[in-house]
Image: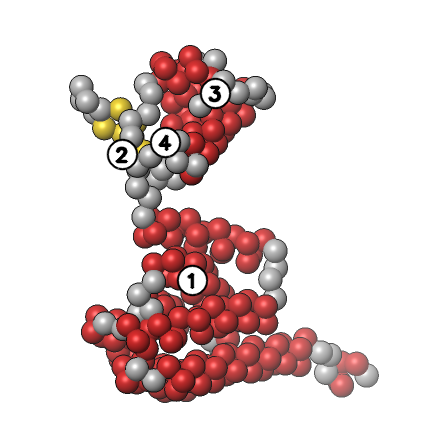
Amino acid sequence: MQKLTLGTEGELPVRIAQAIRDAIVEGRLIVDQRLPSEQELAEQFGVSRPTVREALKRLAAQSLIRTQRGATGGAFVNRLSFEEAAPQQITTSTLLLSMNAVDFETACEARYALERACVPFAAARRKPDHLAAMRTEIFRQGQPGLSDEGFCASDVAFHRALVDAAGNPVLSYQLAGAVEAMQPLMNMITFPARSRARIVALHGAIADAIEAGAAGAAEVALAALADYTAALAEDVRRTRRERAAPSPTAAG
């Protein structure tokens, strides 16, 4: 790492953290390698130790480094796992959807297109735990006392299990945002009009096909669920338009 031409004081920790992050990504700093001490980093970058400390806090918040106490302690490059990175992916996806006012059709199209990519792998690789998780959520969804919030959470958990059944950590990570950010958005829009029994039946068809290793049948059931979701959204929009339109009496 070389001394940087840094900007304003508020930018210093950000620029230093980025420089160290780049060194990790490019392989110049490897997993479990000890970083130079705060004093050494301060001298390298030409800044104070508190500034270096703030930069290291940023890296620790991203799980890129870990700190150890004691004579052999210090800051070390951390092995970032897919599981640790997933919450940040979900948060970013949720913010993008809300801040950019992504329309329902766009979110629905992306979410089901991504999930369909997992189906053939899930049909071939599913483990008993994945099937048990899907069956558990289907059972939960059929309980008459389950709240709307509980049903939505169970819906997300079902699709999470389907994605994880693909046995591909990269797909699970990439789909964390699609399932756990997009799915709640879709549930929030469609829950007033949906039939729980219809969704439970479709989830059951998907689970049956995955258990049988029948990727084609699972894709058909997932496509039917996507079509049903899109139709629900249109029904909700139509109802809202009708309620917002002035009545003939009011117009007269």
Q: CA distance from mark 1 to mark 2?
A: 28 Å
Q: Residue at x 26, y 24 (%)?
A: 74
* Quadrant of res 36: top left
Q: CA distance from mark 4 to mark 1?
A: 29 Å
Q: CA distance from mark 2 to mark 3?
A: 21 Å
Identify the residue under disc 2.
32
Mark 3: amino acid:
Gln
**Earlier-in-chain disc, 4 versus 1:** 4
Residue positioned most to the front = 27
Asked whether residue 186 is in view, the answer is: no
Marks 4/2 in contact by CB < 8 Å: the verdict is: no
Q: Quadrant of the N terminus?
A: top left
**Earlier-in-chain disc, 1 versus 2:** 2
Identify the residue under disc 4.
29
**Circle 2: element type:** loop
**Earlier-in-chain disc, 4 versus 3:** 3
- Marking on residue 46: none
**Earlier-in-chain disc, 1 versus 3:** 3
Q: CA distance from mark 4 to mark 2?
A: 9 Å
Identify the residue under disc 3.
2
Q: Nearer the viewer, residue 224 or 128?
A: 128
Residue positioned most to the right = 252
> Looking at the image, is 62 positioned above or below residue 177?
above
